[in-house]
Amino acid sequence: MNQTSIDSIGARGGSLKSYGAGFVLSLILTAIPFALVMSGALPSSVTLAGIFSAGIVQILAHLHYFLHLDTSSAASWNVLALMFTLLIMALFVGGTIWIMYNLNYRMM
Amino acid sequence: MRTTNASTTGIAHNEEIEHPNTVSIQIFGFWIYLMSDLIMFATLFATFVVLSNAYAGGPTGKELFDLPYLLGETLLLLFSSVAYGLVMLAVHDGQKKLVLIGLVVTLLLGLGFVSMEINEFRGMIAGGHGPDRSAFLSSFFTLVGTHGIHVAFGLIWMAVVIWQVAIKGLTSPVQSRLMRLSMFWHFLDIIWIGIFSIVYLMGVV
């Protein structure tokens, strides 16, 4: 029908293969942290690092395979907006945690 | 000229694409909304992390969270997200019947997720571990509940779009709505990755 409407982020470039790859990758990256926590086999610092890295990789996999964000020019404005948002998020989250823990430490 | 046109043609006028880039502008605008929503979730995450040890003598995450149950919720939302991806492939191929079947499957999986979450909240509140118990639980219910409300509104939106696909078919405006809903749906699954990692799994370790 209207092919130009498909060439946008969120629907562009999707194929059965890419959704399948995203699905399998997500299942594995969900299974790893759950298995780590439920088995309790590793020390907690390693488990925390495992949860954190599996989560970040899975978020990147979702952005790539499901939201079709990439380095193409069609997606550049979306990526730019996301980068700016990540900067704001880093300021909010990092700043909040820094200040509140510092305050907590000094009030002890 | 436009007003006279609109008054005579009514809804039909609304269904036209007035500008060749209308759909991509709508989709970029929706992306900007998602980014603002992401900042809101970031503040809720920051609040949760700061208050995550403020138990006030109440239960800790370790005592409250049921990981196999959480895995069920997580998989329902993931299946729902992938099902919506397949819907977009069917939209691309113009297969209306497949789109409708896929949307109903996505809706049911999302409904399963929301039902499980409501059941979890109900159990916690019934056990005296509601949002009023401690700062930890206040921030837990605010963060997880905000995500749940987003999913619930996504389901209402999905029901409306299912109806539109059935009545109007896969016209350009309907396709645009389907695309924006797909972004919303995948976005909520991404937020859920943060919730099950930071709130639940890190709370149990």
Image (cartoon, coloured by chain):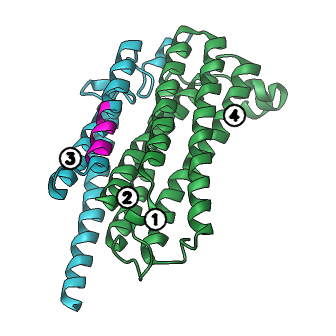
Whether residue B173 can be seen here? no
Name the amino acid, label 4.
Ala
- Indicate yes or no whether the magenta region holds residue A29: yes
Say which chain tag 4 marks.
Answer: B
Whether residue B204 can be seen here? yes
Asked if disc 3 and disc 1 are in contact, CB closer than 8 Å, the reply is no
Residue at the disc numbered 1: B140
Instruction: Select label 3 or label 1 by which is in front.
Output: 3
Residue B37 pos. (x, y %): 45, 52
Q: Are marks 3 and 1 in one subunit? A: no
Q: Nearer the viewer, residue B87 or B139?
A: B139
Residue at the disc numbered 3: A50
For this orientation, the residue located farthest to the right is B8
Say which chain tag 1 marks.
Answer: B
Instruction: Select label 2 or label 4 by which is in front.
Output: 2
Q: CA distance from mark 4 to mark 1?
A: 29 Å
Give the structural element (helix, strand or loop) at label 2: helix
Name the amino acid, label 2.
Val
Asked if disc 2 and disc 4 are in contact, CB closer than 8 Å, the reply is no
Instruction: Select label 4 or label 1 by which is in front.
Output: 1
Q: Residues within 10 Å of mark 2 (few under 14, many from 20)?
A: many
Residue at the disc numbered 4: B159
